[in-house]
Image: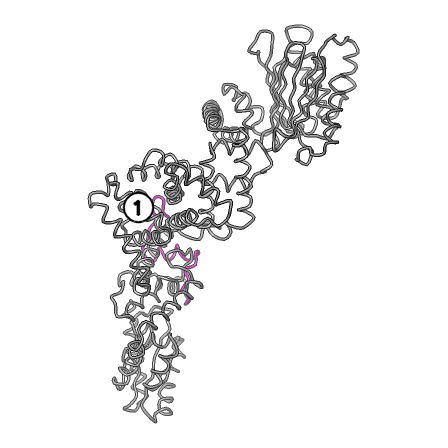
């Protein structure tokens, strides 16, 4: 099509030239894309008028005679009018002029003048070819800053981006073979774009991509939209053109990349594509990753040539795949290569103390370096256009690791990184980092300090590869804050590998129980929201009962309960679910007191977001069997209390007035502990068991304006030991010694009654 369009314009221009009756020592030539026969509907028609001495005025008349009819017909024609000597001066002064002259193609008139114009450019280059190459390199760098890389763009500029049609002309200017097939494809895309848009823009805007794909016959398929297949093909063509041009202009870097790529390729035998790699190939591959930017360039070259897609399972599914989200700036494979290069640079040159400490830990792990580099390369390999990319990523990464034949420790480390690569960044930016349960959840998923260091370095490398919006000081500061809190949980013994393993096992058992009868979304919400204290305490068999109390989350004022026989004779298990609120525990305890229920044990938990799950072991305070009427009375007392329609304190006092308190030698002890937890103040109360004790203690917390996040109540004969994890209403721990003493005094008074 481009050649036919060029031929049609040639005939038109020559006819206008001949009608102008030019002098003998004048010529007209095509330059630029017109000279190379690369015209598309929106191309400029670049022509050069060359004239001999003394013909300026006559030439001006010919120029008008040729151009005005073209302009009147809407043709975008640009021109230059020069002598051969002026062509030489222009070639020396401006890169655009020398490259345009290199594409000079004689149309009509004195051909010697057209040849002289082209020779002027060749002469300038011949005097200092290295200077010409430097000018081309500088121009490419400027275009790269403005238009990016064709293979990386979601809305690429087909002409100006690196690897685009302007680059496709460079091999010809340097006298080297070009990527003709790739250039022809990009020309076809540009032609389709101009037809679809009706304009001259070379930017393939997102809203035009489906129509351009359809015009070119590019079809969608499973896991691929047609527009994404189009961008993949454009990216592949652009990557090969970029590779070719970079090799012509950047000889040292090209040779380094070629040497590294050849070393790896030679270590793989032709029959290795479907077999486990030999150790030499695996070592060469990891060495490529460890070398940082040079190695990644080699892998990018191998991807551009299709080699890596043949030998690395799943790579063909991510090569050139666009990422249509607000954060990622590169296609999947380019993002993965960039993340791997970032990881290698972090290992080699840590850029700040926090990273340096993580590097120290990782390099001290057996195969820690290899796990990080391979994890960075594979963390998003599950982005294949369908399903969860994390689940698919673990499966696909496993296939890659099996092909590579890496050691078990590396496989486990990489699988962990692929599975959890979003954990730190998502948690840090979306959750409350002052929530101890949250930190312990993260610690349980991580397992140990070594894996925490691996995951932190991957998070940094991933963020830097994603783009500026993912690596802001605010985001990275939150990630460091979370890592520090998780590390402290390990150091304090709040979490270790064994406890983390136990939590994962409990989560799996609980999930299995819940999925037998609940909606998957509700089951996953419950498992994710339940604090570690609940998971370590609860029997997974009780999970379905507990889930019904809190899912969907109760509305304000709504109360859900269940009652069943306890695990010991003459006891009952009582569960309460409600929207969390100040004084909820006091209301529940008061309602039980008024209903003649004695609390043997209690576990009070807060689930996200703001849902209370309280579980009690109780017995009848006055007779062994608790009737249905008594349970109905309990629920009625509780609802009235939450609605503010009853005075629990007055009613409890009235009830107590009918009973003489038991005689006991148990001493009241209250301990306010600000050191055991980074997030809560722990208040421990030891006192004699009596009617309404938990109500009095919970009421004292309300009066002291403290939030109870976790409560554990245990009865040992005549003595009760209660532990409460509390904060100020703003979420902070108690810090002032006078404040802590006031709380201790208030709780002591409440315990004594």
Horizontal side of 30 relative to 343 (left or right) equals: left
Residue 282 percent across, percent down from the top left? 28, 42
Which is nearer the eye, 276 or 281?
281
Query: As rendered, which of 447 and 357 lies closer to the eye?
Result: 357
Toward the viewer: 618 or 728? 728
Dominant secondary-structure state across the stretch colored magenta: loop
Question: Which residue is label 1 attached to?
Answer: 285
Describe residue 307's horizontal placement relative to residue 497 as left or right. left
Q: Is residue 283 left or right of residue 532?
A: left
Q: Residue at x 44, y 46 (%)?
A: 462
Place residue 705 in its image quadrant: top right
Residue segment shown in magenta: 198-225
Residue occupying the point 56% across, 39% down: 431
Q: Residues within 10 Å of mark 1 (few under 14, many from 20)?
A: many
Residue 348, image x, y percentages: 41, 49
* Residue 298 to residue 358: above or below: below
The answer to if 200 sits in the magenta stretch is yes
Where residue 440 sits, quadrant-wise, is top right
Reply yes or no: does residue 480 show up in magenta.
Answer: no
Describe the element under mark 1 as helix, strand or loop.
helix
* Above or below, comparing residue 368 to residue 20 in the picture: above
Q: Give the quadrant of the N terminus.
A: bottom left
Residue 668, given in percent of the width and then of the height, sits at: 72, 16
For the point 37% across and 73% down, which residue is it? 44
In the picture, measured across the screen, residue 36 lies left or right of residue 325, that is: left
Image quadrant where one finds the C terminus: top right
Total numbered badges shown on the rendered structure: 1
**Residue 604: image x %, image y %?**
62, 23
Residue that protrudes farthest toward the bottom in the picture: 54
Residue sitting nearer the eye, 709 or 367: 367
């Amino acid at each position: 099509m481009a050649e036919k369009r060029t031929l049609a314009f040639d005939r038109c221009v020559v006819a206008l030239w001949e009608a102008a009756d030019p002098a003998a020592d004048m010529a007209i030539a095509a330059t630029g894309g017109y000279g190379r026969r690369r015209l598309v509907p929106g191309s400029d028609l670049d022509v050069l008028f060359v004239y001999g001495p003394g013909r300026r005025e006559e030439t001006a008349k010919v120029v008008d005679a040729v151009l005005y009819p073209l302009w009147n017909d809407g043709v975008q024609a640009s021109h230059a009018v020069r002598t051969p000597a002026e062509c030489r001066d222009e070639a020396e002064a401006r890169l655009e002029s020398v490259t345009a002259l290199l594409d000079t193609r004689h149309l009509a008139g004195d051909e010697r003048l057209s040849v002289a114009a082209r020779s002027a450019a060749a002469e300038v280059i011949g005097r200092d070819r290295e200077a010409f190459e430097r000018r081309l390199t500088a121009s490419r760098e400027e275009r790269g800053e403005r238009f990016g890389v064709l293979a990386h763009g979601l809305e690429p500029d087909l002409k100006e981006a690196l690897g685009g049609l302007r680059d496709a002309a460079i091999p010809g200017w340097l006298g080297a073979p070009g990527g003709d097939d790739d250039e022809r494809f990009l020309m076809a895309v540009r032609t389709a774009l101009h037809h679809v848009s009706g304009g001259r823009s070379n930017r393939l805007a997102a809203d035009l991509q489906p129509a351009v794909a359809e015009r070119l016959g590019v079809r969608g398929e499973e896991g691929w939209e047609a527009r994404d297949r189009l961008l993949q093909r454009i990216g592949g063509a652009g990557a090969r053109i970029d590779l070719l041009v970079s090799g012509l202009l950047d000889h040292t870097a090209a040779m380094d990349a070629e040497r590294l790529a050849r070393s790896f390729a030679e270590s793989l035998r032709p029959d290795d594509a479907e077999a486990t790699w030999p150790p030499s190939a695996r070592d060469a591959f990891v060495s490529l990753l460890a070398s940082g930017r040079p190695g990644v360039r080699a892998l990018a070259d191998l991807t551009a040539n299709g080699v890596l897609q043949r030998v690395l399972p799943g790579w063909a599914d991510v090569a050139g795949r666009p990422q249509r989200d607000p954060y990622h700036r590169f296609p999947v494979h380019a993002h993965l290569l960039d993340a791997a290069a970032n990881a290698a640079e972090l290992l080699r040159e840590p850029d700040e103390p926090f990273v340096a400490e993580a590097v120290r830990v990782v390099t001290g792990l057996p195969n820690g370096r290899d796990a990080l580099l391979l994890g960075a390369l594979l963390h998003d390999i599950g982005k294949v256009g369908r399903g969860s990319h994390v689940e698919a990523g673990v499966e696909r990464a496993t296939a890659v690791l099996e092909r590579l034949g890496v050691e078990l420790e590396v496989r486990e480390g990489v699988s962990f990184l692929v599975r959890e690569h979003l954990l730190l960044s998502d948690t840090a930016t979306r959750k409350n980092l002052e929530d101890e349960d949250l930190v312990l959840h993260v610690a349980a998923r991580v397992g140990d300090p070594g894996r925490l260091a691996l995951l932190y370095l991957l998070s940094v490398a991933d963020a830097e590869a994603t783009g500026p919006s993912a690596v802001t000081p605010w985001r990275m500061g939150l990630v460091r804050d979370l890592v520090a809190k998780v590390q402290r949980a390990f150091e304090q013994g709040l979490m270790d590998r064994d406890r983390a393993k136990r939590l994962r096992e409990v989560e799996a058992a609980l999930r299995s129980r819940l999925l037998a009868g609940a909606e998957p979304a509700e089951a996953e919400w419950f498992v994710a929201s339940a604090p570690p204290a609940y998971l370590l305490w609860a029997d997974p068999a009780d999970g379905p009962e507990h889930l019904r109390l809190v899912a969907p989350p109760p509305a304000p004022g709504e109360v859900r309960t269940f009652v069943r026989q306890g695990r010991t004779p003459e006891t009952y298990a009582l569960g309460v679910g409600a929207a969390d609120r100040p004084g909820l525990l006091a209301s529940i305890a008061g309602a039980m007191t008024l209903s003649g229920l004695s609390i043997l044990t209690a576990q009070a938990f807060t689930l996200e977001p703001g849902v209370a799950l309280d579980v009690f072991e109780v017995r009848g305070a006055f007779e062994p069997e608790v009737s249905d009427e008594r349970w109905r009375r309990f629920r009625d007392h509780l609802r009235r209390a939450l609605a503010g329609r009853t005075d629990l304190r007055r009613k409890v006092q009235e009830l107590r007035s009918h009973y003489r308190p038991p005689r006991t030698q148990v001493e009241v002890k209250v301990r306010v502990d600000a050191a055991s937890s980074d997030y809560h103040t722990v208040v421990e109360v030891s006192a004699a068991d009596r009617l309404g004790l938990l109500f009095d203690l919970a009421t004292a917390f309300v009066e002291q304006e403290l939030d109870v996040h976790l409560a554990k109540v245990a009865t040992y004969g005549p003595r009760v030991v209660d532990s409460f994890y509390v904060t100020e209403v703003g979420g902070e721990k108690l810090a002032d010694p006078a404040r802590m003493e006031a709380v201790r005094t208030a709780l002591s008074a409440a315990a004594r009654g």
